[in-house]
Image: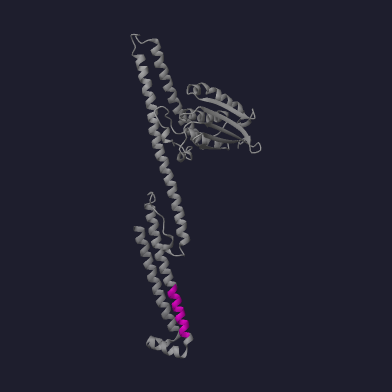
């Protein structure tokens, strides 16, 4: 508000000075043209001059009109600029309001149209960035709530079952029952370890100085081994897991531990959230004239909602229907997958329909190490 008042004060001072200069210039021109105009009526003298020398009168009138037009144009431009500055300040105040609109481009005339358009573009970009920031903050808050719940739930169980074992001072608790309690506590501790690992991995891959440990690896052998590792867990859920690669050996360079973590995350997600699935299929083949390997991890479980597919790899994002007391999770697994794949120079996307949900990873076979 104070800036606006100062701007208007400066504007009126400039206007007053311009008006004085205009008057002095007009009087000076008249005095130079005819000294006797000082002692005669101006209108009468103009009439006489028009009769004897109309070109002089036209010239003087043209000069006066030109000066006046320049003055009016400057006056109008200053008014528009001050109004524009006021509106820009209002935009700054309301920039964090989601329903705030930009400047009206045609309101300030064609001379200021490029400027107002540029301001609107900056304003729109700022609002988009702030909306994304708000969404991330909301996701972080939800993630903290989820992690707190997911850590507290198994921790409560661990303390409860270990408390039963500790309080059995008389040894009346059957050994079989004690083993059962210890097994439950162990499994709950494993859930907590998985949550902590997700958080640790995510903070690592998001660091500016994050580096991969490049080494030669056989991707086909890695997928075959992962299928074997998850075979028992899949069988317990009545799911058949298999791996098929073409060719049978796929040599490439990458970070073996990070890539294994990527595929483990995707397999674990298929087992957790693929309700009703009867198979999980890992497939890899070389495409793009031998430059790229494409890995597909597919299952025939519950379809991912269409509105969620594009957001699956956003950090902290979780498909609402997937959250339940059995699965838990931080919502960071797929964000980690995306970060690691991109660090290898590759890409990842998801497709889901009523028949199949597939995660497609494309990795360059050439060494991407900088």
Residue 307 coordinates in the image, percent (x, y): 45, 41
Residue 349 coordinates in the image, percent (x, y): 53, 38
For residue 321, side relative to residue 244 (left or right): left
| The one of 354 and 325 positioned closer to us in this rendering | 354
Name the quadrant containing residue 138.
top left
| The one of 18 and 172 positioned closer to us in this rendering | 172
What quarter of the picture does the C terminus occupy? top right
Which residue of the protein is positioned furthest toward the right in this rendering?
A: 289
Which residue is located at x 44 percent, y 78 percent? 64
Which residue is located at x 41 percent, y 34 percent? 321
For residue 253, side relative to residue 299 (left or right): right
Which residue of the protein is positioned furthest toward the front in this rendering?
A: 355
Residue 254 visible at all: no
Residue 9 coordinates in the image, percent (x, y): 35, 64
Magenta-span inclusion, residue 64: yes
Total residue callouts: 0
What quarter of the picture does the N terminus occupy? bottom left
Magenta stretch: dominant SS? helix
Which residue is located at x 38 percent, y 24 percent? 155
Q: Range of the magenta residues?
A: 56-69
Magenta-span inclusion, residue 199: no
Name the quadrant containing residue 135.
top left
Residue 338 visible at all: yes
Task: Tell me if residue 34 comes above or below residue 72 in the rendering.
Answer: below
| The one of 30 and 63 positioned closer to us in this rendering | 63
Q: How is the image coloured?
A: one colour
Residue 120 coordinates in the image, percent (x, y): 44, 55
């Amino acid at each position: 508000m104070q800036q606006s008042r100062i701007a208007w004060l400066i504007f009126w001072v400039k206007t007053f000075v311009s008006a004085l200069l205009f008057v002095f210039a007009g009087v000076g021109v008249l005095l130079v043209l005819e000294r006797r105009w000082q002692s005669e009526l101006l209108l009468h003298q103009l009439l006489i001059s028009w009769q004897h020398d109309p070109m002089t009168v036209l010239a003087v009138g043209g000069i006066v009109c030109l000066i006046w037009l320049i003055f009016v144009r400057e006056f109008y431009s200053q008014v528009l600029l001050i109004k524009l500055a006021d509106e820009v300040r209002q935009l700054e105040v309301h920039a964090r309001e989601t329903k705030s609109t930009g400047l009206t481009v045609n309101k300030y005339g064609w001379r200021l149209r490029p400027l107002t358009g540029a301001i609107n573009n900056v304003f729109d970009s700022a609002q988009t960035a702030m909306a994304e920031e708000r969404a991330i903050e909301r996701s972080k808050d939800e993630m903290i709530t989820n992690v707190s719940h997911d850590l507290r739930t198994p921790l409560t169980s661990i303390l409860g079952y270990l408390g039963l074992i500790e309080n059995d001072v008389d040894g009346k608790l059957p050994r079989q029952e004690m083993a059962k309690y210890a097994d439950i506590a162990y499994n709950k501790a494993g859930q907590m370890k998985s949550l902590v690992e997700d958080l640790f991995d995510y903070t690592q891959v998001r660091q500016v100085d994050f580096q991969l440990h490049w080494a030669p690896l056989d991707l086909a052998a890695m997928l075959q081994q992962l299928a074997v590792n998850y075979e028992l867990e899949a069988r317990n859920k009545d799911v058949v897991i298999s791996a098929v690669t073409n060719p049978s050996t796929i040599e490439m360079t990458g970070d073996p531990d990070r890539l294994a973590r990527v595929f483990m995350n995707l397999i674990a997600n298929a087992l957790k959230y693929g309700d009703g699935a009867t198979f999980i299929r890992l497939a890899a083949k070389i495409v793009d004239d031998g430059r790229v390997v494409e890995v597909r991890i597919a299952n025939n479980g519950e379809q991912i909602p269409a509105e969620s597919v594009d957001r699956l790899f956003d950090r902290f994002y979780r498909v609402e229907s997937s959250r339940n007391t059995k699965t838990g999770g931080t919502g960071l697994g797929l964000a980690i997958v995306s970060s690691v794949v991109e660090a290898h120079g590759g890409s990842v996307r998801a497709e889901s329909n009523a028949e199949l949900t597939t995660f497609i990873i494309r990795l360059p076979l050439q060494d991407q190490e900088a």
